[in-house]
Amino acid sequence: MSIKSKVLIGGAAACALALPSAVLARPVSLAVQLKDYGGDGAYLAVYLTDAKGAYAGTLWVAGGKAKYYRNLSDWNRLSTGDGNRLAGVTGASVGAGRTLKVTADLADALIDAGYEIRVDAAVEKFRDSPSEVRVPLTTAAAGKPQSGRQYVQSLTFQLP
């Protein structure tokens, strides 16, 4: 296969992925309520995976020191190849008992298509919690709180 063919195929694939989000997207509001676990602020990675569990994009990362991102192990492992994984999607860590609220524009094509919203959590001097909570990105799951395993009291998302 020639270099020109590879470039055309790569360009077509990139357009196919970008087109649905550019045409039909909606703001999805997420709320991650933390338990009052009695420790320092939590680092959180909120991200999407596809039906096969492959990384599909980062929605938000809470926590400002990149050296601790390795503790968000599932997200870190899955997103390593994404050079833009932190572009405009970072903020401060989230204190125990507090709520992280994020709004992200998601392509309509992702909803009810096997995607999941996942949250990894890490707290200094406590155990890390990869895939702390997982919820299907479906209209049926919207508005229904999903409990986490260790630090997350609930993850709720709203569709307009």
Image (cartoon, rainbow, N blue to C red):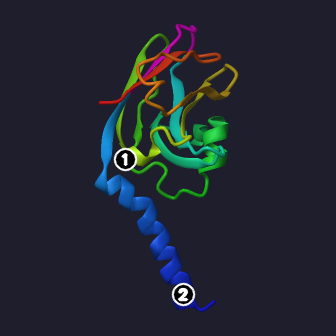
Judge the density around disc 1: few (<14), some (14-19), many (≥20) Cα neighbours within 10 Å.
few
Secondary structure at badge 1 equals: loop
Assign a secondary structure to mark 2.
Answer: helix
Q: Residue at x 29, y 30 (%)?
A: 160
**Which residue is farthest right?**
127
Q: Which mark is residue 47?
A: none
The x and y percentages for residue 35 are: 53, 10
Magenta-highlighted residues: 30-39
Query: In the rendering, at what x and y percent does residue 131 appear?
Result: 64, 30
Residue visible at 51% across and 59% down in the picture: 83
Which quadrant, please, contains the N terminus? bottom right
Q: Upstream in the sequence, badge 2 or badge 1?
A: 2
Magenta stretch: includes residue 149: no
Q: Is residue 70 visible?
A: no
Q: Position of residue 66 (x, y in %)?
A: 54, 43
* Number of marks drawn: 2
Residue marked by disc 2:
5
Q: Which mark is residue 88?
A: 1
Q: Amino acid at mark 2?
A: Ser
2 lies above or below 138: below
Residue 35 within the magenta-colored segment of the rendering: yes
Residue 147: % across, % down: 57, 15
Left/right of residue 120 with respect to residue 88 in the rendered view: right
User: Of discs 2 and 1, which sits in the foreground?
Assistant: 2
